[in-house]
Image (cartoon, grey):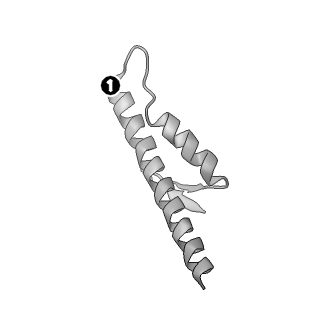
Amino acid sequence: MKITDLNGQEINVTDLIAAIRQAETFKDYHHEPPKPDMDKSQQAYWTDIYNKLMNLKTQLNQKHHEQSIR
């Protein structure tokens, strides 16, 4: 399974659940003291990754559901 990040780099996803957990954690991280520009770009990056992973999970669940109906 692969997703593409905001920089156009392909990321090979070998453990979808672990990847979702990691992205979910990182999307809310921020520096202490805050670095607004850096924090905003990093949060946008990880939020995008998280959303793409969740979409991938939804697609896989739909595919498995369709196969179980047959």
The residue lying furthest to the bottom in this view is 70
Judge whether 59 appears above or below 48 on screen: below
Q: Secondary structure at mark 1?
A: helix
Up the image or down, 27 lies above or below 7; here it is: above
State which quarter of the image contains the N terminus. bottom right
Residue that sits furthest to the top in the current view: 33
Quadrant assignment, res 13: bottom right
Residue 16: where, in percent of width, then height? Answer: 61, 53
Q: Is residue 21 left or right of residue 7?
A: right
> For residue 44, which quarter of the picture?
top left
Which residue was labeled with disc 1?
Answer: 36
Task: Please give the name of the residue rendered at 57% of the width and 61% of the height, measured from the top-left corner.
Answer: 2
The answer to which of 48 and 9 lies nearer the viewer is 48
| Residue 11 % position (x, y) | 57, 54
Q: Is residue 34 above or below residue 28?
A: above
How many other residues sit within 10 Å of disc 1, few (<14), some (14-19) or many (≥20)?
Answer: few
Name the spot of residue 26 as percent of width and height, x first: 50, 35
Quadrant (top left, top right, bottom left, bottom right) of the C terminus: bottom right
